Image: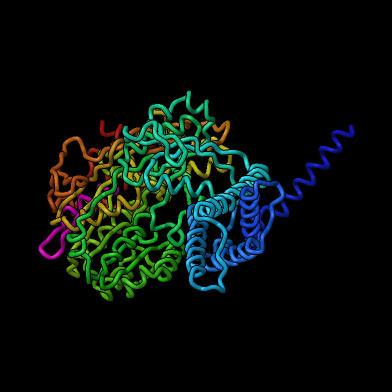
Amino acid sequence: MWKNSLFDFLRKISTSFVERYANRSIPRWLIFFLDLSIVSVVYLLICMVRSNSIIPSFAVNSIGEYVVLLMMYACSFFITKSYQGVIRHIGLRDILLILQDSVFVFCLYQLIKFSGRFVEAVKPLLLRNSEMLFFLAASAVGMILVRFSIKYLYQVLFVSSQAERKNILIYGAGVCGITVKSVLRQDLQNDYRIVGFIDDNPSLWGMQLDGVMIYPAHEAMSETFMAQYNVTTLIMAISKIAASKKQQIFNQALNFGLTVKSVPSAEKWVDGALTSKQLMDIKIEDLLERDPIVLDDKNVSKELRDKVVLVTGAAGSIGSEIARQVVAFSPKQIILLDMAESALYDLQFDMRNEPKFRDLVPNMHFIVASVKDPLRMEEVFKKYRPEVIFHAAAYKHVPFMEDFPYEAVAVNVFGSKLLADLAVKYEVGKFVMISTDKAVNPTNVMGATKRVAEIYIQNLSNACTKFVTTRFGNVLGSNGSVIPLFRKQLERGGPLTVTDKNIIRYFMTIPEACSLVLEAGAMGNGGDIFVFDMGEPVKIYDLALNMIKLSHADNIEIKEIGLRPGEKLYEELLATKENTLPTHHPKIMRARIREYDAECVNAAYKKLEQALKSGDEFAIVERIKDLVPEYISNNSRFSALDNKKV
């Protein structure tokens, strides 16, 4: 009983000690006198050796020499400031300062000895050069050892008692990897242990870097190694690496249940220095990342510089990123239009308060309006006279638009038609429409309305206005996409819902998609539909599994709920009768699509407009199917219209 009480008492004392002193540093004056004490002890030892006795005999010159040496060291300490370093963060710079003290004292000592040969008043000093070198070396070693001993004690008392040990592998034994190792060793809030470096350079395998072994990936990334060293974390410390290779490493690490972190680019380091808090957990976007896109800046700059640019749907995920990228090319004015008031206000706040945006384009105009309002759109074109338009405004949620085809047609079809007609009327130079892969062989209202808009715009190009359509798949992190949905479900403890275990989608990042939009818009000559290289398709089920692994959550289920109305298992970028032609950009292809007779298109639009005015949803969808015969509804109430055709 008394043993337990004693143990509790000691634990309380140690806890109180840790809480009180964990964040305190040793006073500088104490380090100063501690260093002088080390010098004194070393000199005493030399005197003991010289007199061959445990109790040294001091001559008058010995005492004078001792005082002189202390004064020289005190002078050097004040010059180099070696006593001002934080001992628990001791590094190479602190060691170099101590060595500088030794060099300074040696030079000054030799100068005094030399002066003593000519000036009778200066008594010759007693230490021979060999003794002096030993004295300086022993003093330096003593000061360094004391510092490292204090650092070790701090780690034992304050760090190890507070933090759980984290065994870490660093992928990359270059400059970045060394920097990460140094940063982690200086982090006193966590107990990090670097168990090894991984590097793909065979010449480094088996060697040590600052006392840490370098391993090949096939050895370190194995179950045996993970179990032997109890690795918990992998830090990616390579800046130049192929996206496919990075994904392979990330997937391996996740399969071992590791926490995976990456190092931000050097320009994001705080005051040019990396800290452990800046090491970022990888996101699902990193697992889907592809090699960066190289833009033809000259071509895009020629298209946008000193131009008046209008972006519709500017508050959305695609529109806002297009706006940010357009600003980098210094247009004369940029008009950002959206009907979502709150989101547009947020964009206005960001762009007017961010120097890089504000300085490049002082003339930014934010307009709350709907693209289906003829009066407001006429006012905008009349007042600002846009020269380039990026039309990103659209309804895009498949199940929602299956329930509200009237709104889908009003915005996606006739909103686009209104803007396109005004572009011709006001002689806009370039009109770039953002479309979707769901417009190819559509199975839902949303995709079909985007295809209807493509058909109209494709037939509208003239000498003054060049109309260009860009078509791509899902973008990571866009409003309403699957990744934000999974994140919300994870926060609630699951389950994650997928419509079908076999459903696949193409993905690209928002910046990547918008960069390709700018490039395609610049290269378009009118009537073009450009499709983007979306990379390899991704199974949504695998995406959900990886997000669970990244969250390190336990007992999160994945629930299959069935395809939603209008949804299909896979998306296509080109219809079956279409093919593509290459462009100068490897990620952009020009679609060769069938042409429509302009009169037939106009007649079909009039019928669709009449159906829209009637408000009859089935009549509206039926008119769309007349214009887009490949539109076959899937898992939808409008499938009855396809059955009627048969």
Q: Is residue 150 above or below residue 117?
A: above
| Residue 369 vs residue 46, the one in the foreground | 46
Residue extending furthest toward the left: 463
**Quadrant placement of the C terminus:** top left
Q: Is residue 544 above or below residue 413?
A: above
* Left or right side of 609 for 51: right
| Residue 536 vs residue 202, the one in the foreground | 202
| Residue 147 visible, this angle | yes
Instruction: Tell me residue 298's x, y (percent).
Output: 18, 61
**Quadrant placement of the N terminus:** top right
Instruction: Identify which residue is drawn at 56% across, 71% down.
Output: 122
| Residue 402 visible, this angle | no
Residue 341 in magenta? no
Instruction: Tell me residue 495's x, y (percent).
Output: 54, 35
| Residue 244 vs residue 142, the one in the foreground | 142
Instruction: Identify which residue is drawn at 13% across, 43% down.
Output: 581
Instruction: Identify which residue is drawn at 16% across, 55% down.
Output: 524
Instruction: Tell me residue 377's x, y (percent).
Output: 30, 68
Instruction: Identify which residue is drawn at 34% across, 44% down.
Output: 474
Residue 458 in magenta? yes
Instruction: Tell me residue 578's x, y (percent).
Output: 16, 39
Q: Is residue 349 above or below residue 94?
A: below
Scheme by which the image is coloured: rainbow
Residue extending furthest toward the top: 224
Say which quarter of the image contains residue 85: bottom right
The stretch of residues the image draws in magenta is 449-468
Say which quarter of the image contains residue 284: top left
